[in-house]
Image (cartoon, helix red, strand yellow):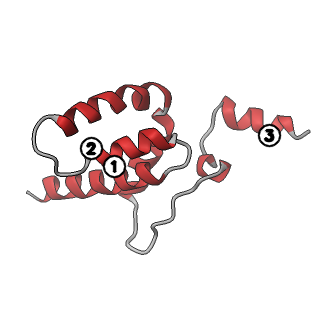
Amino acid sequence: MRAVIRFTTRTIRATRLVVGDRRIPRPLRWGGGLALLPVPGPFDEAVLLLIAVPLFVFYRRPLRDAWSRASTHQQGDDAVPSSRAACEGVAGPATAELDDVGR
């Protein structure tokens, strides 16, 4: 039972981080917030299906960051990074290319 509660809290925290992450376009974030509303019927599920595809295809890194941050989330830390600092420590060509541009 504790595992279910931990998973649910982590999912809620990750969702809150994704909705506030500025690396994801505002309409997708609004769609995520809209899908969380307690609307009766299949409306919220349809919105989730519509926003799931672009999030999964184009914004996998912010989703992964939010999921990992949600596991180590502390109660007083609600700040969501909105700049390149959000990707610090993530190895890959995107950060390496950014470092080479300034030289």
Q: Quadrant of the N terminus?
A: bottom left
Q: Amino acid at mark 2?
A: Ala
Q: Residues within 10 Å of mark 3 (few under 14, many from 20)?
A: few
Count of marks overlaid on the render: 3
Question: Which residue lies under the disc numbered 1?
Answer: 33
In the visual, does 37 lie left or right of 53?
left
Which dot marks residue 52? none
- Find the distance from the CA under tag 1 to the CA under tag 2: 5 Å
Cβ–Cβ under 8 Å for marks 1 and 2:
yes
| Residue beneath the point at 36% across and 32% down | 51
**Which circle's residue, 2 or 3, is located before the other in the chain?**
2
Q: Nearer the viewer, mark 3 or mark 1?
A: 1
Return the x and y of residue 73 as percentages of the image width and height: 40, 63
Q: Percent position (x, y) of residue 57? A: 44, 24
Residue at the image point whose x is 49% and y is 44% from the top: 26
Rounded to the nearest whole Å, what is the CA distance between mark 2 and mark 3? 37 Å
Residue of label 3: 99
Q: Which quadrant does the C terminus fall into?
A: top right
Q: Which residue is mark 2?
A: 35
